[in-house]
Amino acid sequence: MPLPKPEPGLVIHYEYLWRHEHERGDVEGQKRRPCAIVVAVQNIHGNQETVVAPITHLEPQAPAEGIEIPLRVKKYLGLDDQRSWVIVSDLNVFLWPGVDIYQVPNLPSGTFAYGLLPPVLFEQIRARIEALGTLLTQRSEDP
């Protein structure tokens, strides 16, 4: 199964590099996790730039901010039943498809996405990111 088309609201399995990891000099994330695509646009070089927000079980502590994912949405996406948040104050940007996208665990081979967030939840996430002016952690550069 090929990689899905990157679209806002799609939740993918991604090796996320947190800002604090990047600031200490790491170039790879420490854990693969669900991440929500926030933006997917073609840049001036014709490459697909994708911005993702991480999903975590750890409740955000200031200055981090997150939006809790309702349990019914987690069930729909096939995630566990623990509380989880989309972190809106820490984002990664990379060129699609990138080397950090992985198959979703425990699903058929070639499955790289959990599904789409409901539009109302996605809009809440997008609006909060826009209001914060969240900084991005670059993962890859244009050739």
Image (cartoon, rainbow, N blue to C red):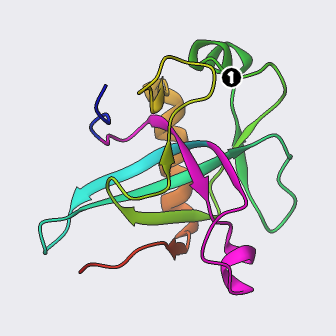
Q: Does 31 sit above or below residue 62? A: above
Instruction: Please provide percent x and percent y for residue 136.
Output: 52, 72
The image quadrant that residue 73 belongs to is top right
Residue under the point 75% across and 86% down: 24
Give the structural element (helix, strand or loop) at label 1.
loop
91 sits to left or right of 3: right
Relative to 98, say whether 14 is above or below.
Answer: above
Which residue is nearer to you in this view: 10 or 102?
102
Total marks placed: 1
- What residue is pinned by disc 1? 79
- Magenta stretch: includes residue 23: yes
The stretch drawn in magenta includes residue 47? no
Depicted 41 relative to depicted 83: above or below = below
Q: Quadrant of the C terminus?
A: bottom left
Q: Position of residue 127 (x, y in %)?
A: 49, 50
Q: Is residue 44 left or right of residue 23?
A: left
**Quarter of the rendering occupied by the N terminus:** top left
| Region rendered in magenta | 6-33
Dividing the picture into quarters, in which one does residue 19 lie? bottom right
Residue 40's x, y, as percent? 30, 52
| Residue at left offset 85%, top offset 64% | 62
Residue 50 found in image quarter: bottom left
Amino acid type at image mark 1: Leu
Q: Nearer the viewer, residue 93 or 67?
A: 93
Q: Is residue 72 above or below residue 54?
A: above
Image x and y of residue 132, in percent: 58, 66
Which residue ends up furthest to the front in the rendered image?
A: 109
Q: Residue at x 44, y 26 (%)?
A: 111
**Residue in the image at 55% along x and 18% along y:** 107
Q: Is residue 13 left or right of residue 40?
A: right
